[in-house]
Amino acid sequence: MKLGNRLEEYVGSKEPQTRSGMLLLESAKRLRISPEDVAEVIKPYTVYIQRLPVPIMGKVVNLISGIVLHNRARGPYKGGIRIAKDVDIWETTELARLMTLKTALADIGLGGGKSGISVDLRALYAAMVKEKRFGADFREFSRIAKADIIIEFADHFRWLFSQRHYIPAPDMGSGEEEMVRIYNATLDPASVTGKPDGVEGWLPGRTEATGYGVWYAAIKDMERRGRAPEQCTAAIQGFGKVGMYAAQFLYQSGVRVIGITDLTGGVYDPEGLDITDLTKHYASKGAFKGYKTRNLTHQRLFRLKADYLIPAATGHVIDSKNAGEIGAKVIVEGANMPVTYDAMQILIQKGVEIIPDVYANAGGVIASNIEYRQAVGGDTFTREMTFSHIRERFDSMYEAMLPLIKKGRTMSEAGIDTALLRVHRTMLERGQLSR
Ligand code: NAD
């Protein structure tokens, strides 16, 4: 069999134009890195596509999962496990590439990887209820089904996790409950991060870390503009691990969070939502539904005249169709790639500043790095030490980008340039590229 050198030949489809790919090509031109070299940085090293026959409630459900090991020039492949219905291998590749850039910008000894498990849990739930295999609510179903799925996934990839070659973590659709299943399969605290409190090698503050970093990125921006948190408003899309904690930290520091939406609906209060009360409601109902304030759609959330818009749900939600309608002055990318490449150009024209994902949501991987180092024999951290370390890393990421920002680069360009230079240099040093 003839082996080609393009992933497209094996996957049977062409990689769509991706934001990270476009930004890297532009960055390489600015940095005078050759097209051949940047192509090597853009491409992933290894892609696994694995069928997962998962027994759920007495029925075998056939799923597809993928792991993309993008780049480990600077350390073990690192990146979360996404469980969602619209996962595809190119999206996983894009997310893995972003991890390579994020870990390089944060200057931590990790590389970039990502996993995706494609499953439509809502449709599966409806089918199970129809077949009378399950009778309780969706939240309960989702918890049980995800446990079955991740046990199967961990079983297939135990060998990979046990080598600490790729170290998974939570992403959209997965959390501590899923990470502990990976630990159960490997019994190695360094094989996975995002483990629940009390499980060998856990890190206090890891659960809140990404939201904490998003909050800190916003607070630093307020400081730069000479504005007190009490004078600022925020609108958030997503009330999961990232959005909920970002909302809590913003609320605690005095920012008025005026609108939040997610898959279960949305809430709006121009005076500012009581996030403590809202969190309690959401925890008991699993949805915004029934909360006392006005309802809000995603479309209206994006149009709100808030100082900060924080997309913290899924990718590509702000595209060329709705970018012109964005009401906020600053977008803090809590999610990965919530703004498409085309939308970025429209927003720049409109004067909306973007605090990019590669920086804004790096708090999670910064904390994961401590969790991993702690598990391989490093110091034990308290929650406050974790938070203080995140703040330090954000300060040094910003300092690294500042000279480029002063030269007129956007923050996104400054972040990608800094990351690409570091990855490229290490690949040269390791003999992975020709000098
Ligand atoms: P999560 O599963 O905990 O929560 C996701 C939230 O987004 C939920 O409120 C859900 O209702 C909402 N959502 C999902 N799909 C949506 C859609 N199509 N439209 C509107 N809302 C939708 O996930 P998370 O861990 O909070 O991750 C959110 C984002 O942050 C993702 O883009 C993820 O890649 C990114 N991120 C997460 C981490 C982490 O540590 N968890 C780190 C860095 C980046």
Image: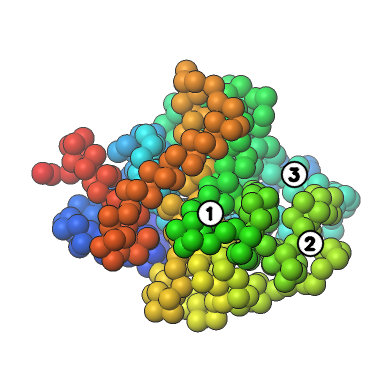
Q: Are marks 3 and 1 in contact (CB under 8 Å)?
A: no
Please tell me which residue lies in front, 19 or 236.
236
Q: Between residues 306 and 164, which one lies in front from this camera angle? A: 306
For label 1, count other residues whose C-alpha is less than 10 Å away and answer few (under 14), some (14-19) or many (20+): some
Give the residue at mark 2: 288
Tag 3: amino acid: Arg
Calculate the distance from the C-alpha at mark 3 to the C-alpha at mark 1. 34 Å
Mark 2 C-beta to ligand 1 under 8 Å? no
Residue at position x 84%, y 50% from top?
284
Q: Is mark 1 within 8 Å of ligand 1?
A: no
Chosen colour scheme: rainbow
Ranked by sequence position, the earlier of labels 3 and 2 is 3
Residue at x-position 67% and y-position 29% = 197
Which-is-in-front pick, marks 3 and 1?
1
Q: Earlier in the sequence, mark 3 or mark 1?
A: 3
Q: Which element carries disc 3, helix, strand or loop?
A: helix
**Is the residue marked by circle 3 packed among few (<14), some (14-19), or many (20+) residues within 10 Å?**
few
Amino acid type of the residue tagged 1 in the rendering: Ile
Quadrant of ligand 1: it is bottom right
Q: Is residue 417 left or right of residue 201?
A: left
Q: Nearer the viewer, mark 3 or mark 2?
A: 2
Dot 2: element: loop
Sequence-wise, the earlier of marks 1 and 2 is 1
Seen from the viewer's position, the closer of residues 421 and 170 is: 421
